[in-house]
Image (spheres, coloured by chain):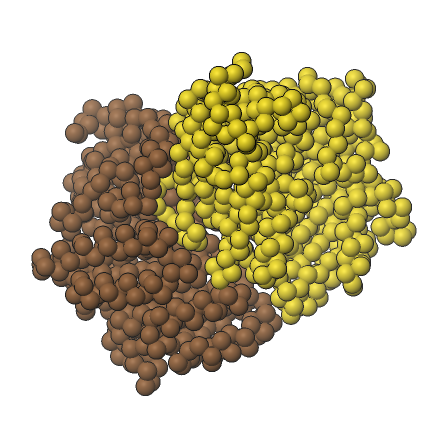
Chain colours: A yellow, B brown
């Protein structure tokens, strides 16, 4: 249902910021899920107060509002599925570092990597690092509580948000928290907003916690006979309280993909073995001490290991992790990247489940991920024109979600629900839990204008045609 | 308004757990705010499901329910101000450490120090440490998002809660999050519950994040000519990215209190100087490296400093901090301990404000606190029988709250609102913010049975007579 009168008023109020052209609306009609839903207008505010104007109008006229950063989400969280207006936050991209407090004051449209670089230039570190960090915005990171490789040791976006600024759907400006590390005054709507995928309020800016930049980093690549052995070895490491800053697991299919992409074997003579890529970070002397223990672990547990002795060697080892994702498209023209989470105690059971899933689905399912926090990326590969494979992929996703929940894990660790995971929300949450969430939605957005159609309604994304577009952050 | 029929039903259902005796009800009628409101019954569940029974009955009959741990809160958050039933959580006190995941599975009634000790025994560390940690429960810590001395480097309770179990006011069991470090599926009611002072749900258990126990700790006491110099020096330390695990400031009145209590001067020849007590924690070699830089800072900034060279010396230095609070009662028989938060950039302005406040109110106002996170404890001392002092104290609290908000800070860093801070909630939050919070309350507790009378209504605690009781955790 279009809203021509409201859109005319919007143009009158914010003409210079409002784009109703077919090209502009098309560009804002999809995110990385590549399913297109045309909005009626795209507003690109230059200052915060303009967002209040948009929302006040939208709320009055019941116009759906979807907020977007760069649209890197794979879940469809930024797709304007009910039309209406899109607010593009990319111009609200300031980054200011408070040097002594160790905080970053940022606009919602600031790119994650820009924040990291600004912090690093001042000796501070902002750890959350989604793989799209050169493109994705902090607003998007906050919306889906993004994680990345540093989650096990340092935490995720939520763990670094000190305060939020933004708007209620009524257009009223609110601030949740102050730029201080302690705050215990009133209900915590800051964290309720984080991960709510733009459905409870519109984030315009944030104060982020920074930590001192570690002085030293040390990288080690380890290979194992099989997946179960690799995951078991990781648990030995964790039990020894040796906490890596990064701990990336790649199963043998992921390794084969990387080897195909780079044209060399990771370990000469050990082609196609699952690997764990480790990075330790800390004070120079701390890392020196730690090496001794970690190398003893590697000797006892791994089939082979390679320590990076120079920046070039670090890059070489990291190439394995970076290249594997793109190379997967040799196994299928389509990929479902599921960011499930599994408790450590069930790692081996999960590895055996994935082996079974590959066999039963007859699909390639390279799996890699952040094993210090249980966040495994299960990549289900298929050819979209092959209906047998497509149906097998859809069934594999269902089986995967049922299994992670049965193993005490989560259907999403860092991507959120959006449209794509709506069929599985009720696996994760009881009816009482869903009712409580919906009651909160109704309380904070009584007219239902903020990102409607996400989270709670079941959307079968398999029924939608995917756009044949390519983003700079696409791996292929 | 009493609920005799509902209470009879409660006794029928949970007779063995229900106490309606005058002595039992009196003991549950107050917390450390020492203002008494008699409940009709006290239920002490042994198993979680019993709480569901209590709530289902309470919700049906609209009986107010107040949950208590050990009642160490100073804010009145656990006082059953509207009567009804109290649920005492002390029997739900299990603590189980998951060694490889680095997590503690705890019941709401577990004591904070017990959790710390269980973690420490396995090489793990749970940093949040309210000063009442030997008594207070994790359920209470979660209810008010408790902090402590480690907040600057490690964070507060919220930063260590991975998942919560508990009940909606309807008696339905819910779980927010899984025992995994990543979770991004659905609205985050976990963090909405944290700090909500038992008004949105009843927490029965939690999964807590642990971090590796630091191998080394190093303690340093530094003295400064005056408060402004001390706070300025702290900022220099923070700008150098030297992050202490603990950074406790004591103004000169607090130091004088400690000196009177211990019978010795902290620095011979420097009696009554403000001090900063620092503890650094990390790997052995890391601390060795760090000492060099920190001592250079102390030489440049401090009037005098003492390094602890043995466990006994560490204890000696800590005695300063521990004894000062009790010794304050030489300055008045009553104390208002206000846990305000001030951004670092305004430390010196705040120090000057406190000097002015002392002069204008003619009261002793020893101030100490956690200056790595801006959380200063302002202790307003008065004699309760002296009406001039009492009125001056009440006015000083008002002025203090207005000032911290004007300086960009928070009216509470770790105590919460309860009854005592209700007159100031609207200084911190705009009308729109309060409306949003109240809408959430209405959504999750439509009948208003959970801890009614707290947070939003303005309660003048000065009008209530304080009980003359003494708790084991009282400083005096």
* Residue B442 vs residue B355, the one in the foreground: B355
The residue lying at 57 percent from left, 44 percent from top is A93
Residue A50 in view in this figure: yes
Q: Residue A443: image x %, image y %?
A: 39, 27
The residue lying at 45 percent from left, 46 percent from top is A163
Q: Tell me the quadrant of the picture where the C terminus of chain A can be found.
A: top right
* Residue A233 vs residue B220, the one in the foreground: B220
* Residue B353 vs residue B201, the one in the foreground: B353
Q: Is residue B152 above or below residue B187?
A: below
Q: Residue A340: image x %, image y %?
A: 64, 36
Q: Residue B396: image x %, image y %?
A: 21, 57
* Residue A93 vs residue A353, the one in the foreground: A93
The residue lying at 33 percent from left, 28 percent from top is B442
Residue at the extreme top = A1
Residue A151 in view in this figure: no
Q: Residue A293: image x %, image y %?
A: 69, 63
Query: Number of marks in the image?
Result: 0
Q: Quadrant of residue B202?
A: top left
Q: Is residue B463 above or below residue A281?
A: above
The residue lying at 59 percent from left, 69 percent from top is B286
* Left/right of residue A205 with respect to residue A217 in the rendered view: left
* Left/right of residue A300 with respect to residue B70 in the rendered view: right
């Amino acid at each position: 249902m279009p809203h021509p009168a409201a859109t005319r008023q919007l143009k009158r109020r914010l003409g210079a910021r409002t784009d109703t052209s077919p090209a502009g609306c098309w560009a804002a009609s999809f995110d990385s899920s590549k399913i297109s839903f045309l909005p009626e207008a795209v507003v690109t505010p230059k200052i915060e107060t303009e967002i209040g104007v948009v929302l006040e109008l939208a709320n009055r006229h019941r116009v759906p509002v979807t907020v977007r950063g760069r649209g890197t989400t794979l879940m469809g969280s930024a797709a304007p599925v009910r039309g209406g207006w899109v607010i593009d936050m990319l111009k609200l991209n300031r980054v200011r570092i408070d040097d002594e407090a160790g905080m970053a004051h940022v606009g919602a449209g600031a790119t994650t990597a820009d924040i990291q670089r600004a912090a690093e230039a001042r000796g501070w570190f902002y750890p959350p690092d989604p793989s799209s960090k050169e493109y994705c915005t902090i607003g998007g990171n906050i919306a889906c509580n993004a994680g990345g490789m540093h989650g096990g040791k340092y935490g995720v976006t939520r763990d670094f948000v000190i305060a939020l600024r933004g708007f209620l759907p009524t257009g009223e400006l609110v601030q949740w928290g102050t730029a201080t590390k302690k705050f215990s005054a009133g209900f915590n709507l800051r964290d309720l907003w984080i991960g709510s995928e733009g459905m409870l309020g519109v984030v315009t800016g944030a104060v982020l916690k920074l930590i001192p930049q570690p002085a030293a980093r040390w990288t080690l690549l380890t290979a194992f006979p099989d997946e179960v052995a690799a995951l078991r070895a990781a648990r030995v490491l964790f039990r020894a309280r040796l906490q890596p800053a990064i701990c990336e697991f790649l199963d043998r299919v992921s390794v084969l993909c990387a080897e195909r992409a780079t044209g060399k074997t990771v370990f000469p003579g050990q082609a196609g073995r699952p690997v764990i890529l480790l990075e330790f970070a800390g004070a120079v002397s701390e890392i020196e001490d730690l090496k001794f223990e970690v190398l003893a672990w590697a000797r006892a547990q791994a089939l082979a290991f390679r320590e990076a002795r120079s920046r070039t060697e670090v890059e070489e080892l990291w190439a394995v992790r970076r290249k594997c994702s793109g190379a997967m498209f040799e196994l299928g023209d389509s990929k479902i990247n599921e960011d499930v989470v599994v408790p450590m105690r069930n790692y081996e059971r999960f590895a055996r489940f994935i082996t079974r899933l590959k066999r039963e689905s007859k699909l390639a399912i390279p799996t890699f991920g952040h094993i210090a926090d249980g966040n495994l990326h299960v990549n289900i590969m298929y050819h979209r024109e092959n209906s047998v494979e497509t149906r097998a992929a859809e069934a594999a996703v269902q089986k995967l979600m049922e299994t992670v929940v049965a193993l005490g894990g989560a259907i999403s660790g860092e991507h959120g629900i959006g449209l794509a995971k709506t069929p599985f929300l009720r696996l994760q949450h009881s009816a009482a839990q869903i009712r409580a969430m919906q009651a909160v939605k109704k309380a904070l957005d009584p007219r239902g204008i903020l990102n409607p159609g996400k989270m709670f309604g079941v959307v079968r994304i398999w029924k939608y045609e995917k756009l044949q577009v390519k983003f700079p952050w696409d791996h292929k």
